Image (cartoon, grey):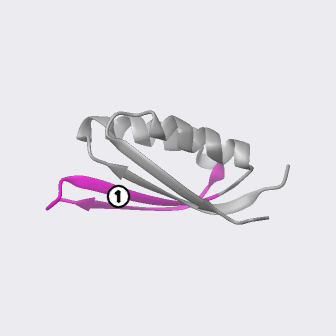
Amino acid sequence: MNNRIGVVAIIVEDSNSIQKVNSVLSSYSELIVGRMGVPYKEKQVKVISIIVDGTTDEIGALTGKLGRLDGVTVKSALTKK
């Protein structure tokens, strides 16, 4: 299976889920090329953007685990090939 490059946007609205998000990201660290996190204090949310390089199955597993966490929204965009 070919690797794809993509961007994963993560919005965390429940502060109790931050530790779980970081744990999931750590377990998929081999896929992560770069990461930027911004705590938006005025809106009480955290926004994390990660650049990933992996197969669609690997990236799907990462986003699936993140999306099942309470108060976490995840969207991704991948290269076509």
Whether 34 is among the magenta residues is: yes
Q: Position of residue 58 (x, y in %)?
A: 69, 43
Relative to residue 31, is residue 81 depicted above or below?
below
Compared across the picture, whether 51 is left or right of 2 comes to left
Whether 27 is among the magenta residues is: no
Q: Furthest-right residue in view?
A: 1
Q: Nearer the viewer, residue 49 or 72?
A: 72
Count of marks overlaid on the render? 1
The residue located at (83%, 55%) in the rendering is 2
Compared across the picture, whether 16 is left or right of 48 comes to left
The residue located at (37%, 43%) in the rendering is 72
Q: SS class of the residue under badge 1?
A: strand
Crowding at label 1, few (<14), some or many (≥20) Cα neighbours within 10 Å? some
Q: Position of residue 11 (x, y in %)?
A: 36, 52
Q: Position of residue 74 (x, y in %)?
A: 46, 49
Q: Which residue is mark 1?
A: 47
Amino acid type of the residue that numbered disc 1 sits on in the rendered structure:
Val
Q: Position of residue 13 (x, y in %)?
A: 27, 46
Compared across the picture, whether 64 is left or right of 15 comes to right
Q: What are the residue bounds of the magenta stretch? A: 31-52
Q: Furthest-left residue in view?
A: 42
Quarter in which the C terminus is drawn: bottom right
Q: State the image quarter where residue 49 is shown.
A: bottom left
Per the picture, the main secondary structure of the magenta-coloured stretch is: strand
